[in-house]
Amino acid sequence: MADQPETYICRCEEVTREEIEAAIKNGATTMNELKRWTRTGMGLCQGKMCSKNVSRILSEATGQKPEEVLPSTFRQPVRPVRIEVISGHD
């Protein structure tokens, strides 16, 4: 089933295998490029559910060994936090 073009690989951003493969055909060679071009891994799970499958697809399409595919960069969610919370003081 995962080999079907219309299969959702990144459910959070609704990115299909076909979209990932198209990005690779158009020149994406890294996880970061796939993330920028397709938004895969940018949803609520931040790639926890899809990154292994995306990495596998990239590896197969580019001929890289799976361990050579570097993970995409991550940024921590930014939210305002009161200094009292960080310092532990009232």
Image (tube, helix red, strand yellow):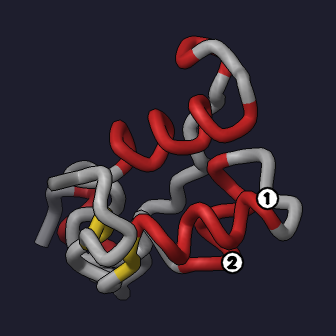
Kindly indicate the quadrant of the structure image that contains residue 67: top right
Coordinates of residue 49 in the picture (x, y in percent): 21, 52
* Rendered view: 47 above or below 44: above
Judge left or right: residue 43 versus residue 88: right
Q: Measuring 30% from the left and 84% from the top, which residue is drawn there? A: 14
The structure residue drawn at horizontal position 12% and vertical position 72%, both measured from the top left corner, is: 90
What x and y, as percent, mark residue 83?
33, 74
Secondary element under disc 1, as helix, strand or loop, is loop
Residue 38's label in the rendered image is: none
Q: Which residue is mark 1?
A: 28
Q: Residues within 10 Å of mark 2 (few under 14, many from 20)?
A: some
Residue indicated by mark 2? 37
Depth order, front residue of 50/65: 65
Can you say whether 53 is above or below 10 in the image? above
Which residue is at the front of the view, 15 or 89? 15
Q: Above or below — where is 9 with respect to 78?
A: above
Question: Please, what secondary structure does the residue beneath circle 2 have?
Answer: helix
* Percent of width and height locating residue 75: 52, 61
Q: Does residue 80 sit above or below 3 in this rendering?
A: below
Q: Please state if 10 lies on the left or on the right of 36 as rendered.
A: left
Instruction: Identify the residue at horizontal 63%, vertical 13% (top origin).
Output: 65
CB-based contact (under 8 Å), mark 1 and mark 2 = yes
Residue type, mark 1 in image: Ala
Give coordinates of residue 77: x percent, y percent. Answer: 39, 72
